[in-house]
Image (spheres, helix red, strand yellow):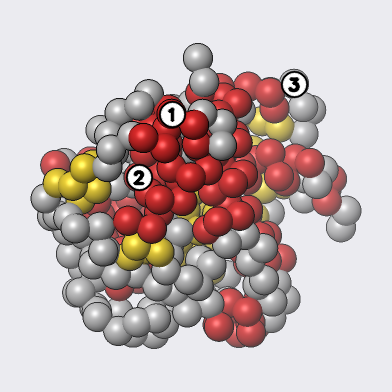
Amino acid sequence: MNTSEIKILITGGAGFIGSNLCEYFLNKKYQVVCLDNLATGYCKNIEHLLDDPNFTFIEGDIRNFKDCQKAVEGVHYVLHQAALGSVPRSIQDPLSSNEVNVTGFLNMLQASKEAGIKRFVYAASSSTYGDSESLPKVEEVIGKPLSPYAITKYVNELYAEIFGKTYGMETIGLRYFNVFGRKQDPNGAYAAVIPKFVLQFMRYESPVINGDGNYSRDFTYIDNVIQMNELAMLTQNPDAINTVFNTAFGDRTTLNQLVAVLQEELARFDPKIADVEIKHGPNRIGDIPHSLASIDKAKKILGYNPQYSLQQGIKEAVQWYWNNLKQ
């Protein structure tokens, strides 16, 4: 089949990761359906795609089973990105996180099964590693979840596995590690750390690091995540089916190091940013101290080869934020 004959549903397609996926696959001439309720996604992320004859936008909610059924009509592959992210948000409001991330996920799985979808690729999460202290994180060794959000994302993996075993569905989970890049929202109470700090630096406001800044993360640039979604969608390797893969760069950076890199890159555009003071606050409830992915399984089975380190990704992201946020 030519790409023009293949239809992909991207749930959460107006969000940060979803809109980047929509853009990428449209550029490769696939037919793309975007399902989003615009709760945390934005029309501005996809408005330049609306005139493309290969693009369909459905404003709908994965909590509504009929919306899920409508979205999967004639679809070959589902890239399920729709979720309520954020550990703190799930601690504040566990009911909404569960409705979207568990009930919504199950709705999408069931609708996909009924529609005879070829493969269901979904956004899993590194939060699933919970209190496991082993580093690097390997897919087969997880701990107890540390937040309602982590529970919901682990339940997704369990449901996907059961749908694979019971109904013969092809599912692949991608455990995302701290994804960042263009179109990631810097505003709101639950903004991710990189866009939030970028915006604060640009306003000469002091970023506040949770804790002493020695917590570390495997920050993963959006283009590495796009590569993983494409590999998972198209792989013919039977070992890839009904399993999960770490989706990361495979390197870790402390929050102190991250802020230093951000400040340095932004100061290239505005030297005054180099003088902004960094502050520290209390540790956040539910946070994992250290996160580092082993990407050996993805390399071996999917042929994954991430192109962007933190430094390379930050360069690209900062350039995008400077062009798009500077008033």
Disc 3 or 1, which lies upstream in sequence? 3
Disc 1 or 2, which lies upstream in sequence? 2
The numbered disc on residue 87 is: none
In the structure shown, which secondary structural element does the residue marked by tag 2 occupy?
Answer: helix
Residue identifier under label 2:
193
Would you say 221 lies left or right of 192 here? right
Decide if residue 21 is in sight here. Answer: yes
For the point 72% across and 46% down, the residue is 25
Q: Which residue type does callout 2 highlight?
A: Val
Would you say 185 lies left or right of 46 here? left
Residue identifier under label 1:
272
For the point 35% across and 45% down, the residue is 193
Mark 1 vs mark 2, CA separation in Å? 21 Å
Choose top left, top right, bottom left or bottom right for residue 212.
bottom left
10 Å crowding of disc 1: few (<14), some (14-19), many (20+): few
In the structure shown, which secondary structural element does the residue marked by tag 3 occupy?
Answer: loop
- Looking at this rendering, what residue extends furthest in the top direction? 327
Disc 2 or 3, which lies upstream in sequence? 3
| Label 1–label 2 contact, CB within 8 A | no
Q: Which residue type does callout 1 highlight?
A: Lys
In the structure shown, which secondary structural element does the residue marked by tag 1 occupy?
Answer: helix
Residue identifier under label 3:
51
Q: Which residue type does callout 3 highlight?
A: Asp
For the point 57% across and 62% down, the residue is 309
Decide if residue 59 is in sight here. Answer: no
